[in-house]
Image (spheres, rainbow, N blue to C red):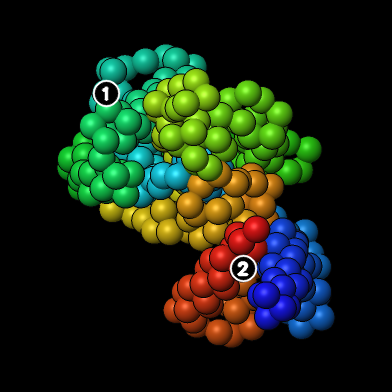
Amino acid sequence: MAELSLSKRSEAPARRMGRRMRDWGAPLALLALLVFNVAVTPNFLTWQTFFVNLTQVATIVIVAVGMTLVIATGGIDLSVGSLMAIAGALAPLILGGSLFGPLDPTTAVALALGVPVLVTAALGLFNGVLVTGFRIQPIIATLVLFIAGRGIAQVMTNGNLQTFSNPSFQWIGLGRISGVPVQAVLMVVIVLAMAWVLRATVYGRHVLATGGNEGAARLAGIPVARVKLAVYAISGLLSGIAGLIVISINSSADANLIGLGMELDAIAAVAVGGTLLTGGRATVIGTLLGALIIQLVRYTLLANGVPDAAALVVKAAIILLAVWLQRQGASR
């Protein structure tokens, strides 16, 4: 009995430390990266560097916010990159008159912004139907569109690069509001909105309850199926927005490349930010911090002459560390 009591007392500080590292690891890591770059990286404290990192991370954050909600329910969405490609393929077709025929400029821009996002939201809902209606594991259900989605985008464009120039449409990627890039403003609005939904609404509590213990959530009367359908639809919608931002920046759409690898970046941001990959605990602000950490690591390595391939290795190490910290803090 004495040995058991001693064991419990010795484990408690380790568990508390694990929880502290899980909760504070991301902010401290981001702070350390900022301090390192200020001291070592040339021209880090410039507006140009700030906006470069902000614009590069914006689409990752937008997609990762949707991924956070999905993972909070105990699921995962591998289709986000392919949905970005579909949105990116649809918009130029609408602007060029290939999909709906010749349109007046205002209508064309409105449809090019609205239709792709609605389509990707519907495809996200399709993922949710596979998960809830057909009881398919989320990783398999979303693998369907992960594979087929990019193929659909390539079929729509005949595998060709689509180029376009439409300043009104491209405002979402190239415009500025009081000097701040529009995609950064969108990112902040989406993060704050989803953080509020998750923390302050009944739906947010239902999301976390579903991921924490789905059986208990059902017994408590929570509409688990509808909760899951909604998170996959939101993930699809946000993926569509990210896809439109990407093509507006590039003035072109390549179905082979849009969103390539985005699912991994989004999952990495969620994991590093402190959301439990098993569901039940989620933090949208943490996801933002996780994405910023990954972006800053990549920028730091490149700015100091380290090959881009090394950034992938470092990213993998960061994810492993984040998962380890989650395991350390998960025990109660």
Query: Residue shown at 39%/58% (left/top)?
Result: 261
Please tell me which residue is depicted at 51% across the width and 72% down the height of the picture: 320
Spatial separation of the CA atoms under disc 2 and disc 1: 53 Å
Q: Is residue 94 left or right of residue 301?
A: left
Residue 93 seen anywhere in this rendered image of the structure? no
Q: Nearer the viewer, residue 63 or 224?
A: 224
Answer above or below: position of 141 versus 125.
Answer: below
Question: In the figure, 155 relative to 325: above or below?
Answer: above
Observer-nearest residue: 232 or 5?
5
The picture places residue 42, in percent across and down from the top left corner, at 75, 79
Going by the numbered disc 2, the residue's amino acid type is: Gln
Looking at the image, is mark 2 or mark 1 earlier in the sequence? 1
Q: Quadrant of the C terminus?
A: bottom right
Residue 188 at what x, y percent from top left? 69, 40
136 with respect to 281 (left or right): left
Q: Depth check: 293 or 301 in front?
A: 293
